[in-house]
Amino acid sequence: MNASSPSSDRPNSPSGSALAQSIPVYRAEDFLVIDGANIDDTLSFADEAVLDDVYELGTRAQRHRLSIHAQSGGDFRVAQDTQAGIPDARVIVDSCMTVMTLDGTTLEMLLLVELDSEAHVASVHVLPLAPLAPNGHYRLVGIERENAARKLAQVACVSFSRGTNITMSSGAQRPIEDLKVGDKVLTRDDGGQEIRWIGQHTVRAVGDFAPIVIKAGTLNNTNDLVVSPDHRLFIYQRRDALGAGRSEVLVKARHLVNGDTVTQQDGGFIDYFQLLFDQHEIIYAEGIAAETLLVDTRTRPALTDTVSSEVLEALSGHSGWLHEEFEVGSELLGPDAADKLRKASKR
């Protein structure tokens, strides 16, 4: 079936390249209609779904990591390092479906349709934006196409939480919600730089998308730092405690979780903020060096309705420096990584 549906020291990456985005997905076949018009059918894309159908998530359903590269046209390709999907297959963001649980709670799921070489549907992947329970029953109450791509882009946006203190170019500390476009923020590589855009959205703080809390003192920070899970922190080690072969490393916040000084805060809602500069910068949040929003083909849909085309076109610094050579993977990090980094970076 067809789917309708110092700055000179910076390393360079191929122009226009984008990082792969890894997301935990279910197979559409894991969802079976147990009541409604499509009874006994499995979940499909928006054109074939019917409101008020009740789906059951199979008891043996497991999530698999789908790794995707965003394309300039808004679609995606399955990356080589993936558990789900066929590498290089085309993937389109079909829709965002809203389902309701038996207790009246509403949850959102993004449907990603994988196509074969003849543009026929090969697989449908389901990305839940909140945890789902095996054997749980979910009534389909909404189907939306217009904002589905933006919601996926927001998953890829690195974000700071409300209340995070940002170091200004003057050295002053200011809560992120008080910042304005044009304010100058201290950056690690380029001194004081003006903010070009500030984004904000509120999400459920649940599951894989719940924020990471780095408690005060963990990385020599004065206050708690709360960031999105894939937010990368820039740490200078006086000695190479991780065995990374370099003193400067970028570490995703989720890889530092140890259940004690670094935790994932699950429950309720959280206000997330994104800061955009002419370049992909490293700034200081609660004293910790952390990256700002990187505009590439993954994250651009989150900006298109609120940022002028002139501003987007001026962001040339976002295609040439992705900090890739600084990033440390989870294989070098263990439950004591945060403690090792704190000691290694201490003056």
Image (spheres, rainbow, N blue to C red):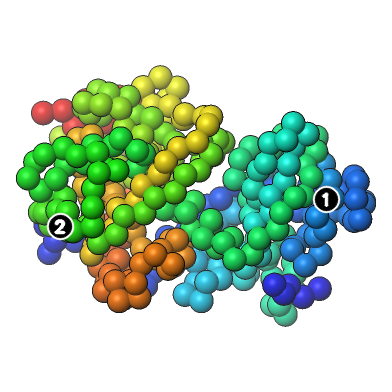
Closest to the observer, 266 or 336: 266
Residue named by callout 1: 52
Q: Is residue 304 shown above or below 125? A: below
x and y percent of residue 175 in the render? 24, 38
Q: Looking at the rendering, which quadrant does residue 112 occupy?
A: bottom right
Q: Quadrant of the N terminus?
A: bottom right
Q: Is residue 103 shown above or below 251? A: above
Residue named by callout 2: 193
Residue depicted at x 73% and y 72%: 3
Residue depicted at x 30% and y 66%: 318
- Label 2 neighbour load within 10 Å: few <14, some 14-19, many 20+: many
- Distance from label 2 to label 1 (Cα)? 51 Å
291 on left or right of 210: left
Residue situated furthest bottom in the rendering: 118
Closest to the observer, 108 or 264: 108
**Label 2 SS:** strand
Residue depicted at x 47% and y 54%: 154
Callout in the foreground (2, 1): 1
Q: Could you tell me the amino acid type at mark 2?
A: Gln
- Label 1 neighbour load within 10 Å: few <14, some 14-19, many 20+: some
- Kindly tell me whether residue 263 is visible in this rendering: yes
Q: Could you tell me the amino acid type at mark 1?
A: Asp
- Kindly tell me whether residue 342 is visible in this rendering: no
